[in-house]
Amino acid sequence: QVQLVESGGGSVQPGDSLTLSCVASGFTLDGYIVGWFRQAPGKEREGVSAISSGSSITVYSDSVKGRFTISRDYLKNTVYLQMNSLHSEDTGIYYCAAAKMASVSRPQATDFMTNGRGSYWGQGTQVTVSP
């Protein structure tokens, strides 16, 4: 069964850190661009970050740049999102998505993050940041 499964969410205080994981099963993430997206209550889904198949290109939204880091472990078939200095505005359901794109340019990676055209999506993990 082809699926993406997110984990690592939780309830934390402002300034805390969390690391989200996105594990793929039924297929290999090699050759796929993978992104993280989030949706806050009452708001549209927004792209947070994306990483190219070869990890040479990473892109971030302005709201998380400098605080979040995306990475991938090929052996574990997993993509991570390290989130530091969390703000209450980071609250939401975080989803990972993957699209078959073996080679991308930075504009293409940004477009994927912005438009979320993933072929596979996870079920999401809740992140709540509150005092």
Image: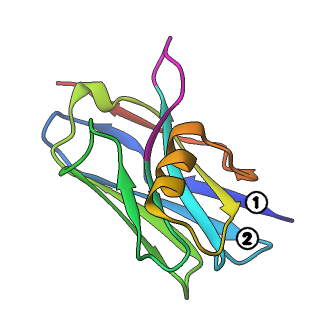
Q: Where is residue 6 in the image (x, y as percent from the top left)?
A: 56, 54
Q: Which residue lies furthest to the top in this view?
A: 42
Whether the residues at callouts 2 and 1 have beta carbons within 8 Å, the answer is yes
Range of residues picked out in magenta = 40-48
In terms of image quadrants, where is residue 130?
A: top left
Q: Position of residue 111 (x, y in %)?
A: 53, 46
Residue 82 in the image: above or below residue 102: above
Task: Of the two numbered discs 2 and 1 on the same chain, state the one appearing first in sequence.
Answer: 1
**Is residue 37 rendered to the left or right of residue 28?**
left
Could you tell me which residue is drawn at 19 percent across and 34 percent down?
Answer: 13
Tell me the kind of residue under disc 2.
Ser
Residue 14 is a magenta residue: no
- The residue that label 2 is drawn on is 25
The numbered mark at residue 119 is none
Residue 46 is a magenta residue: yes
Q: Where is residue 33 in the image (x, y as percent from the top left)?
A: 59, 64
- The residue that label 1 is drawn on is 3
Location of the N terminus (image quadrant): bottom right
Could you tell me which residue is drawn at 12 percent across and 40 percent down?
Answer: 15
Tell me the crowding category of disc 1: few under 14, some 14 to 19, or many 20 or more residues within 10 angstroms, Cα based.
some
Residue 51 in the image: above or below residue 30: above
Could you tell me which residue is drawn at 15 percent across and 44 percent down?
Answer: 85
Q: Nearer the viewer, residue 42 or 56?
A: 56
Residue 71 in the image: above or below residue 95: below
In terms of image quadrants, where is residue 101?
A: bottom right
Q: Position of residue 2 (x, y in %)?
A: 82, 64
Could you tell me which residue is drawn at 50 percent across and 65 percent down?
Answer: 105
Tell me which secondary structure the magenta stretch mostly adopts: loop
Helix, strand or loop status at disc 1: strand
